[in-house]
Image (cartoon, rainbow, N blue to C red):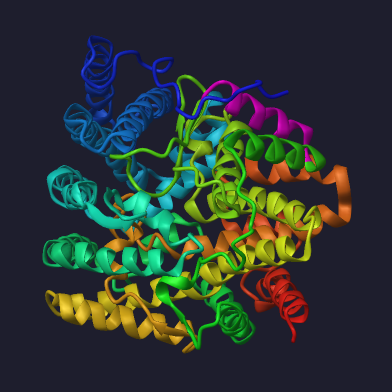
Amino acid sequence: MLAEKLVQTWDLERIIPGGCGSPEFKEFLANLDAELAAVTEQAVALTSDSAPEMWASVVLGMQEASRKVFQAYSYTGCATAQDTKDTEAKLAYAKCAQVGAALGNISVRIEAASKEATQEHWEAILAQPSLQAITWNLNEIREKAVDKMPASQEVLAVDLAVDGYHGWGALYDQIVGRIVIPVEIDGKVEELSVGQATNKFHEPDRALRQRTWESWKAAWGKESELIGHTLNSLSGFRLGLYKHRGWDSILKEPLSINRMSEASLEAMFHAAKLARGTMTKFLERKAQLLGLEKLAWYDRDAPLFESTRKVSYDEAATFIVEQFNRFSPRMANFAARAFNNRWIEVEDRPNKMPGGFMTPFPLAQESRIFMTFSGDAGGNGTLAHELGHAYHTEVMWDLPPMAQEYAMNVAETASTFAELIVSSAAIEHAATREEKLALLSNRLEDATAYLMNIPARFYFEKAFYAERAKGPVSVERISALMEATLNDWYNGALSEVEPLFWASKGHFYGTSVPFYNFPYCFGYLFSNGIYQQARQEGPSFESKYVDLLRDTGRMTVEELAKRHLGVDLTQPEFWIAGTQMALSDAELFLSLTEK
């Protein structure tokens, strides 16, 4: 099923040859500009009482253009991530922001016209055969339009965001790209990128972790004033836009984007808080096993046993495909295709962006996955996680683009579910007690991230925005807010936290989805519930899972859970059940390590 020897770099040439400076890519952008101009001309002429046929033409034109805009974004994003020093890629990515604004303006005009249409005329529009598959999405657009500014102001806001709101997000990426973290390794100082330095926190040598940590703090501290200004400016733009829209809640947009109610959000975090005590016991036991009174921030991901086996990329790929196949042959075949066709970039080298992501290429109907493979259980988990994202996209390619636009919270469901399949199998197949404990520890480290770290990020952002609404917030105050929420959610289990976590965590600077953090907690707990059902039902669950994924772009999460799982997300019971695997893992870990 897999090639004999896998390549560790991805293939972007099959998408568009020659890179961001190539004639082919420039021609692609030129054609896209022309197409957007034509659709924009139609959208400008669109009114609430335009003929249903004209409505269909504009909506379908916008959808087709959106596929090409996404293709351009994905291509330039990949080029920037693989080489932070690629100047042409950075310029091309900035150009995509302008292209995205043009698409956004078309969407704004459709929203505005939909708001003014009579119900009778709106129903006639929805009756168009070419729009039948996206009636839910069009109704969603109409409902959201009621809370927006007049069209001319929304268009202006989209245009200003290119060099304002999104510009600040892009600046953050450039700051991170230039950061160098010098660390002494084997008697020689090496200059590491942020991504390479992050991997050092998974090393068994505590002295190396500590040296990395000290250099890490110094590097981020050096940039903290500029990053603090970036965060203040980005959040100020957002707050200003909300003020002019008449929105009084900072959560209105993120909840709307994630198609989620505040009641479900509160029930979810209630369950996370209930699990905090058991997660704290795990962290305390891990500290004991490492011979420490308490874990430091840089000890959270430390392996418990130096003998923890590392695997090659090829070994990891083989294991992932095998385990996916136990649940879903379709999912396994997809993963094998991704490995064999070089959709994945994992090589450990300088000048790569930190972190991992999956991005789809709609015209090619392929995805690309980016990460730096470490060879440990965490790296294997990340690989499975991103493949889960890609599989989610894969099963939706035949749907209209508008119906493929699923929110981040349900996106994290598919990825976390894939990760669960692989981590559960790894624990099951552990050859020794030490290996089982190491794997349990790794999964519990993930659980603490979802149940402690993610909530801390959310409550930090809430506190920060409450203060930012009164004016700019100093770096010292931002750090104090960060430190307080981390200490609260880690329940005093760490000897020190990272006050500059607000600077080093890129999730606070994303401009596509505000409050980019809480969807991870949703995805973790939601996928745990799905995983339990999958284990109970066996192979018959595969089709149900695919149906659930296909509906993620055309209903609220409450509707999705009710239809496919028969549960109510506004009540705590489902979320509490979602914590049970983590709690069971913790109890098993505590039992196996009892002296």
Question: Is 34 displayed left or right of 376 in the figure?
Answer: left
Question: Is 488 displayed left or right of 73 in the figure?
Answer: right
Rendered position, 75 above or below 523: above
For the point 70% across and 49% down, the residue is 422
Magenta segment: 328-342
Rendered position, 362 above or below 81: above
For the point 37% across and 32% down, the residue is 74
Residue 234 visible in the displayed image? yes
The image quarter containing residue 576 is: bottom right
Callout count? 0
Of residues 350 and 360, the one nearer the viewer is 350
Of residues 369 and 372, the one nearer the viewer is 372
Q: Is residue 277 magenta?
A: no
Q: Is residue 341 magenta?
A: yes
Of residues 515 and 554, the one nearer the viewer is 515
For the point 63% across and 24% down, the residue is 337
Residue 477 x/y as whole percent = 19, 82
Residue 91 x/y as whole percent = 16, 31
Residue 236 x/y as whole percent = 17, 65
For the point 48% across and 19% down, the residue is 364
Residue 525 visible in the displayed image? no
Please identify the dominant SS of the magenta region: helix
The image quarter containing residue 393 is: top right
Q: Quadrant of the N terminus?
A: top right
Residue 479 x/y as whole percent = 24, 78
Q: Quadrant of the C terminus?
A: bottom right
Of residues 142 and 26, the one nearer the viewer is 26
Question: Is 269 displayed left or right of 422 in the figure?
Answer: left
